[in-house]
Each structure stands twice: as C-alpha cells, then as structure tokens.
Amino acid sequence: MAYLFWAVAAAILLLILMKYRAAKTRHQAAGNVVFAKYTFGKLSLEDQTRVKEKAEEIANKAASDEIEEYGWYAVAMHALKIPSAIPDNASWYHTKRPDVLRPSDLMVRSVLIFLNNNYNLNIEISGLSSPKKEKPPIDSVLNDEEEPKKLSKPDIEK
C-alpha cells in the first residue's frame, strides 16, 4: 500500500513539474511576442526587412497569426543581435518553440498588462482587447435629464 501512495505522489509531483515548465515556456514566449511587437515598431525599415527575412528563413513557413509572427520575429532579432527596446530588458528569452502560444493566450495579455502598468507602454496585439481598464466618467453615470434625488427628513426616518 505504501508503494501505491508513493507512486501516486510521484505521478502528481511529475504532473505539477510538467505544468510549471509549460507555463514557464508560455510566459517566455509571450514576453518575446510582446517585446518583439514593441521593438519591431521602433526599427528602421531596413532593419524590419532584415528581421522579416531572417524570421522566414528560421521558421521555414508563414505565420498563421500575429502572435506567431512576432514570436518568430523575436527569434530573428535575437539571431541578428538586435536588443529588445523594452525598458530594463534589453535581452530576449531563449525559447525553442516560439509558436507554443494560442492566438488568444492569456499569458500574452498578462505581459501586456504588466508593461502597461509598470512602464506605461500601450502595446496592441490583434485578437486581444486593450489591457487598459478605463473607468467611465462620473458624468456618464448620472443621466443628464435626471437630477440626483435629495432625501428629505421623512425619507430618512423610514
């Protein structure tokens, strides 16, 4: 019976480690996608062309969506020794599979929110809504036609 317990415990531990590794890989790929989107926009047209050509050479296929495209651009910029333009992070994550992300992966959204909150960088990725949480103006809460109701003393006592 003790062997069964340890076998189940080892299987659960292995599953947790596999999930952790997959999440770490997805986070690194998401970081590269967002970093590449920002950096690519800052490059000259000549450098953008070099990056596109290198990405096509490395990927050996066309990207199916914007997330995959910028994942390969990150690998290409790393190969071309072009540093990331993100403040405090001039390097790229070393990922073997930049195409590991799904088109609407929440890991990408979390990186977008982090960069928006900490560096005030508003980076847009198609398929994902803007990470900014805008509050409605106070005036829009009150209808222009209605005045706020003032409570009279009898209303308060009830």
Image: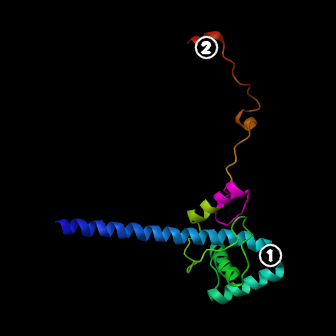
Q: Is residue 9 left or right of residue 134?
A: left
Which residue matches tag 2?
A: 155
Query: Residue 122's spot in the image, x, y percent?
Result: 73, 59
| Image point (57%, 77%), residue name | 95
Task: Tell me what residue is drawn at x 68 percent, y 57 percent.
Answer: 130
Which of marks 1 and 2 precedes in the sequence? 1
Q: Secondary structure at mark 1?
A: loop
Query: In the rendered picture of this protein, how many numbered marks are placed on residues?
Result: 2
Residue at figure coordinates x 70%, y 87% from the top left: 54
Give the number of the disc on residue 43. 1
Q: Which mark is residue 90?
A: none
User: Does the magenta stretch mainly form a helix, a strand or a loop?
Assistant: loop
Residue 148 lies, in percent from the top left, at 71, 25
Q: Is residue 63 magenta?
A: no
**Residue placed most toward the observer, 76 or 93:** 93
Measure how far apart labels 2 and 1 are at the Cα level: 65 Å
Q: What percent of the width, then of the height, locates residue 53?
A: 73, 87
Badge 2 crowding class, 10 Å Cα cut-off, few under 14, some 14 to 19, many 20 or more, is: few
Q: Foreground residue, 126 or 40? A: 40
Magenta run includes residue 123: yes
| 86 over 69 or under it: above or below | above
- Camera-nearest residue between 147 and 53: 53
- Inspect the image, locate mark 2, and give the three-letter code of the amino acid beneath it: Asp
Q: Quadrant of residue 144?
A: top right
Residue numbers of the magenta segment: 112-131
Quarter of the picture containing the N terminus is: bottom left
